Image (cartoon, grey):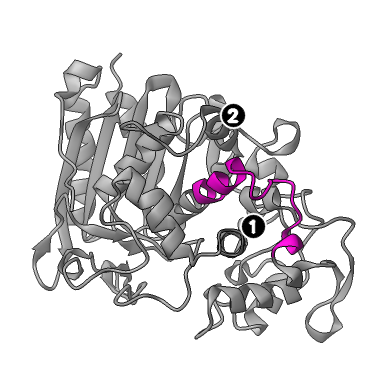
Amino acid sequence: MALLRQEVDPGEVGLDGKALDRLDQHFAHHVDEGRLPGYLVAVSRGGRVAHLTAHGHRDIAAGLPVEPDTLWRIYSMTKPVTAVAALILVEEGRMSLDDPVDRYLPAFAEPRVYVSGSGADTVTRPAEGPIRVRHLMTHTSGLTFAFYHTHPVDALYREAGLESSVVPGTTLAQTTDVYARLPLQFEPGTQWNYSVASNVLGRVIEVVSGQPLDTFFAERVFGPLGMTDAGFHVTDEQAGRLSELYGDADGGGIEPIPGLPLRGRPRFLSGSGGMVASAHDVHRFMELLRRRGELDGTRLLAPETVDLMTSNHLPGGADLRAFGSRPAHDERGNDGVGFGLSLSVVIDPARTQAPSGMGTYGWSGVATTTFWVDPSRDLTVQFMTQVRPRSSHTIFPDLKRLVHEAVAA
């Protein structure tokens, strides 16, 4: 276990300590009002942690506090890790971003695209081209999620038992075969739709590397980066540090809900959302990206590869709202934000929902965890809690605004 610690006074790196106090007070108020169980926030500049606060509880009923070594289900923050793992294989020449996915997963040969109808009356046509590895990494593959309820293909996912993106009791290989049998929402490369694509990418990594996903991550990403608590399950020694997961209660406030169980190696290794990690682990991963592929003398990726990962890949400089499949992505938070290889990328700060530097990149998880790297201000930020809200909230925009106010120089 390694512990994240504050390394420098905020003022020494151009941050306003009083503004950071206001940030803490804001989120402490959420805890006091029962909207969050507890949280951890860390703000770093130039790679040095200048602000670290752990407040509230990781387990309310047991009275256990949030501490710097608390473990968190990071859900979709797994996706950028999966992308880094895939890019390691790309750099080694073992696969290419332009490879058709069916080269590695034959079930994806001859994909079909939705035309009309629903259920048994669904009409499809052959896709004009294959799903490529880059389509998986940019979420432009035509795959979807069952929970959207905005398109007939979403309903087909539910009928196939994919309400939670996984057919219960199956492996990654088995579930990706189910994805392959379902029609695509659109021609690959023509729209953006956040989807199960990172699970398919995880399976591609397994086939190309010849290793289970958790083994490849441990040997090629977690070990080299010193991400000592990161993984797809917790050990008996780690279990007491794992935060409880909460959701919105019917009468207001929050209540415990089931989350990734994480006790024992899971049958399904999700490249989309299966990871658990500590704040130290997330800091190490952010540092790899901020330092363009190298950390403490260990180079995982070339600088140019990280630049590629953190650049907008949507055609014509489009943002997520313009290029997103509607109505699922027609929302204010997608203005001015493009998409790289499994990361959001700010392309027009003037249009973003909350203050952001040009080129800021990062991603979030469904349990209200988030991280971002702002290259223009040499700033990295993470926020960790464990609440799956039923509807949208202002926590992330508030966090970005409050951090922005703290940047004094």
Q: Can residue 400 be seen in this view?
A: no
- Is disc 2 placed on a helix, strand or loop? loop
User: How far across and down, in percent of the image, does residue 352 sit?
Assistant: 53, 33
Left or right relative to 296: residue 28: left
Which quadrant of the structure image shows residue 147?
A: bottom right
Residue 342 falls left or right of residue 140: left
| Residue 387 position (above or below residue 310) | below
Magenta span includes 368: no
**Mark 1 residue type:** Ala
Using the image as rendered, state which of residue 211 and residue 336 is in the foreground: 211
Which of discs 2 and 1 lies nearer the camera? The answer is 2
Kind of element beneath mark 1: loop
Q: Which mark is residue 328?
A: 1
Quarter-wise, where is residue 90 in the image? top right
Write the residue at 15% across / 34% down: 6
Q: Position of residue 191 (x, y in %)?
A: 74, 50
Residue 363 at x, y = what percent?
46, 46
Image point (35%, 73%), residue name: 259
Relative to 320, residue 166 above or below: below
Span colored in magenta: 83-104
- Mark before the other along the chain sequence, 2 or 1: 1
* 86 falls in the magenta region: yes
Q: Which residue lies furthest to the left in this view?
A: 63
Residue of label 2: 347
- In the picture, the disc for residue 355 is none
| Picture layout, residue 222 above or below residue 46 | below
Q: Nearer the viewer, residue 96 or 141?
A: 96
Q: Position of residue 122 (x, y in %)?
A: 84, 78
Q: Which amino acid does label 2 sit on?
A: Ile
